[in-house]
Image (spheres, grey):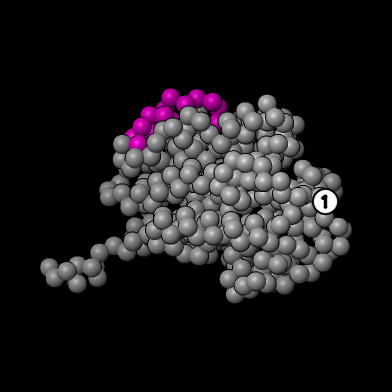
Amino acid sequence: MPAALSALIAPAAPTYGLEEEVFVLYGGRTSLGSLWDMGGLLWQDPGRNWAATATNFRRGEAARREVMSSVEVSTRVEFSAATLFAATLSRRRELARVFSSGQLIALGALPGSDRYHTAGLHIHVGVPDAERQRVYGNLAYFLPVLTLASASSPYFGEGEGGPLSRIKSSFALGELGSDPYERFQDLIITRRLGTLELRVLDPVPDPERLWAIVQAVEKIAKLPGTLPFSRQSYNQLRAQMLGGSSDALFERADELAERVGFSTDWLHFTEADRVRGHTEVHGWASTCAHLDGLYRSGIWQDLGTPHPLPAAWRGYAGFARYYLPKLPYIARKAYVENKK
């Protein structure tokens, strides 16, 4: 067969995108004042940032004390793990520039979090329609391994909740059901984009760990053949993982290491372990300072970023600068994502 013809009929290579949610803390709390700086990012490049930024708010009784939750930036569509990783670091630099004040904390949950006050890392994988179910199953087969590797949620509510406390508690996650388009599951097929979206991962502040996870996603998406995935087995492994049992999970991790070279070291010492260990010795304030340094520089260090509580006017002005102009887009996006 001529090479040119072979290329035409070969399966299209997967595409990738990434959405990253982070908390912006001022004196240990979120603030509506962060909307002002998100507005600054929006208007630097409206054509791009209209769809590539977002903000989240707390709900219920907690919203009376603290309205703001996480902020979000996303990449463009990329064609390899390498360019996706580079694009993510570029987005981090852009966010850091507009937030000259405020600590950027890429964790899945915070002390005092509830099921609506969390942050996640969502990776999108685009594949042809004919490949979608097969790649969905292959990604789901290894997803619990990547989930534990991403774990960054040691604190939740009034104290420690285990490394996966966000995944145990978030309203936006759940077991895999019969309808892959149903939104609040660990892995879905998106209605709006048609991509496979890994929703369950915690934010990954350490660039080295993020690079390992992004590479693994790419390699799994490109695996030939069909792995022995079933929703029942995924949900069983998920329950075991959240319950603290790890034998079956580490067997799966060994298989992933053999197939794509993903190191099991990422499971033995998680970001949640580092955060908890540093907090026990140095306190939560020091941990936040070092997490901010890690997000901004890629190094676990305290950069001394100022984080005083913003003036009240920044919240009101930020709402007008960022949120009001985006309302039509936000409404349309919500409609498309949730329609049956």
Would you say residue 283 is visible in this rendering? yes
Extreme-bottom residue of the structure = 47
The quarter holding residue 113 reads top right
Instruction: From the viewer's perspective, tell me whether residue 113 is left or right of residue 314.
Output: left
At horizontal 29% and vertical 62% (from top left) the residue drawn is 11
The quarter holding residue 299 reads top right
Quadrant the C terminus occupies = bottom right
In the image, residue 334 above or below residue 227: below
Would you say residue 120 is visible in this rendering? no
Q: Nearer the viewer, residue 12 or 53?
A: 53
Residue 22, percent across and down?
Answer: 64, 50
Give the class, few, some or many, for how many residues have Cα within 10 Å of label 1's Cα (few <14, many ≥20): some
The quarter holding residue 161 reads top right
Residue 158, percent across and down?
Answer: 75, 31
* Chain part drawn in magenta: 241-257
- Residue ID for mark 1: 309
Q: Nearer the viewer, residue 294 or 175?
A: 294
Quadrant the N terminus occupies = bottom left
Q: Is residue 256 magenta?
A: yes
Amino acid type shown at disc 1 = Leu
In the image, residue 319 above or below residue 273: below
Instruction: From the viewer's perspective, tell me whether residue 65 is left or right of residue 198.
Output: right
Q: Main secondary structure of the magenta part?
A: helix
Dot 1: element:
loop
At horizontal 35% and vertical 49% (from top left) the residue drawn is 219
Q: Is residue 78 magenta?
A: no
